[in-house]
Image (tube, rainbow, N blue to C red):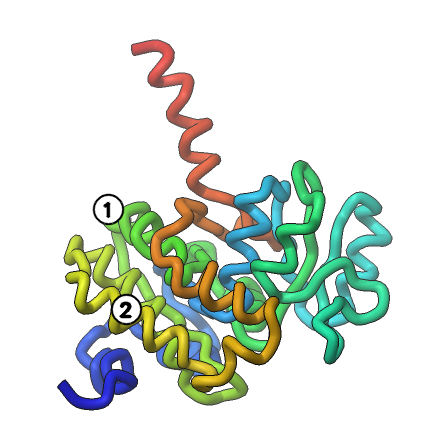
Amino acid sequence: MGDATATATSETNALDDRLIERCELIPDDPAPGAYVVVDTMHFSNTVIELLANGAEYVHITEERGEEFAYRESNPRALIGGGSTDEYEPTDGYDFFNSPSYVQGLDVDGRPVSMTSSNGGRAVAALRANGSDGVDVYVGSTMNATALGRHLRDRAGPIHLVSSGSKGDLAIEDHVGATLISRALDGVELSETERELFRRQVKHAKGVDYVDKHELRRRDVLDYATNFDSRAVIPKLVGESLVDAAVARKEAEAPRQASD
């Protein structure tokens, strides 16, 4: 069957005209359409978990460090930044990009502000340069099917931004983009494919990554490889990401009540 790590590479996705292979390749003047930012480890999954745990919204800053000014204007906000060697937030921050770490936060009903060097940067770039016809979403392996179904009937092009890492391709982001693309097309994964993709994500940052620290182990095994575990659909509204799935349910509730 060959090298498993070749499955979700750029060669495989070259025929998929939805894919933008790295966040650096986002056009300076993005054309109207939906842009899904995929930064599986760890930005996308952290955003998903913050919203799943009840955060009012996730504000995305232009640069790391601007979160402090945001909290001054929004005293109830929790802010995310970098991590120490011991996997604790750096001075002044409440958390860092880790879906495992944010489980210990009381975010219910509170705003959050954060960014990241890849996924957060991609969201900020699309926000700054996009026209009125540009919609921005955040996806990963965790919400691929829910997001694909949500966008399936949307008119216009859909672009999957595989954020990458420091300018390089990231296999885990390509896997996330591939799963979303399959969901958009209504093509289910076979069990063999699902297991292969899980293996790719598990080892995407190196075979020893899951042993680096218990927190990172959970980030990978409990979240990144837990495909379709969330129905959260982060969508950019203004400067912040909100759960479009919740907004849709709230909009549909009055109609259902009147039927």
Q: What residue is shown at x 45% (from left), y 89% (from top)?
A: 168
For the residue labelled by badge 1, is the local secondary structure a helix, a strand or a loop?
loop
Query: What crowding class fits label 1: few (fewer than 14 Cα within 10 Å), some (14-19), or many (20 or more)?
Result: few
The residue indicated by pointer 1 is 153
Q: Residue furthest top?
A: 258
- The image's mark for residue 178 is 2
Name the residue type under label 1: Asp
Q: Is residue 20 above or below residue 51?
A: below
Q: What residue is shown at x 64% (from left), y 59% (from top)?
A: 101
Sequence-first disc among 1 and 2: 1
Foreground pick, 53 / 19: 53
Foreground pick, 125 / 147: 147
Name the residue type under label 2: Thr
- Where does the image place residue 175, in percent across and percent down from the top left? 32, 72
- Where does the image place residue 13, in percent across and percent down from the top left? 24, 78
Q: Is residue 53 above or below residue 88?
A: above
Left or right: 193, with 41 as reference point: left
Q: What residue is shown at x 26% (from left), y 68% (from top)?
A: 195
Q: Is residue 145 above or below residue 96?
A: above
- The mark closer to the camera, 1 or 2, is 2
Q: Is residue 79 above or below residue 11?
A: above
Q: What residue is shown at x 41% (from left), y 85% (from top)?
A: 169
Left or right: 95, with 167 as reference point: right
> Which quarter of the figure has residue 79?
bottom right
- Where does the image place residue 56, in percent across and percent down from the top left? 63, 41
For the residue labelled by badge 2, is the local secondary structure a helix, a strand or a loop?
helix
Foreground pick, 8 / 71: 8
